[in-house]
Amino acid sequence: MVQGVSKAGSGAWFVVYCKPREESRATAHLENQRFDVLFPQVRLRRRLRGRYRRVIEPMFPRYLFVRLRPEDNQAAIRSTRGVIGLVRFGDRTPTVPQPVIDHILERSDVHGCVDLDVESTFNPGEAVQVAEGPFSGYQAVFEQRTGDGRVAVLMEIMQRERRVELPEHALVRQAR
């Protein structure tokens, strides 16, 4: 459950459009005004300067969700730092269905992050296929994770079984 946001509550959820890379600022200022704010983020692995690193990025860049009650002043949202305004279609401001918000809340940790950096889904001894890199198209047998996003596989090279280390993202489950 995201810190400060409860599933139960009165009001409807709306989408707020933010200035570029100012979602955190907008969230802080809206929370200071006592609005319920949901700024979902994802934790994933990105290649930065030649290495894979864990990063946290907005799930929906430039967007966040705010719960408004009928008595809330929508004009206050437009004048909040980091905010451009509520998302509108013509003169209509659509609401976000509660099941969508509930689904995001269920998948989020207390900091509002959804973890997309999952651990290896391969089991030792499982048949895999190399999908990219110099061994693309080769069949292999998954052996183990070796750390820092790399795995060890056994491949038949020049009629001998060899242990090869590859980036984990280069493997796919072999089609049955």
Image: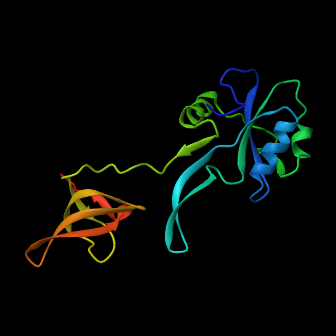
x and y, in percent, of residue 74 in the image = 88, 36
User: Residue 109 sits in which quadrant?
Assistant: top right
Along the viewing direction, whichever of 123 and 136 lies nearer the viewer = 123
Vertical placement of residue 71 versus 21, above or below: above
Q: Which residue is pictured at 23% across the width and 57% down the height?
A: 143
Vertical placement of residue 14 versus 162, above or below: above
Q: Is residue 115 left or right of residue 33?
A: left
x and y, in percent, of residue 114 in the image = 55, 43
Along the viewing direction, whichever of 76 and 92 lies nearer the viewer = 76
* Quadrant including the N terminus: top right
Q: Is residue 26 visible?
A: yes
Vertical placement of residue 129 versus 4, above or below: below
Along the viewing direction, whichever of 94 and 45 lies nearer the viewer = 45
Q: Which residue is pictured at 62% across the width and 35% down the height?
A: 110
Vertical placement of residue 69 versus 84, above or below: above
Q: Is residue 28 left or right of residue 121?
A: right
Q: Is residue 90 visible?
A: no
Q: Is residue 9 left or right of residue 159?
A: right
x and y, in percent, of residue 87 in the image = 76, 45
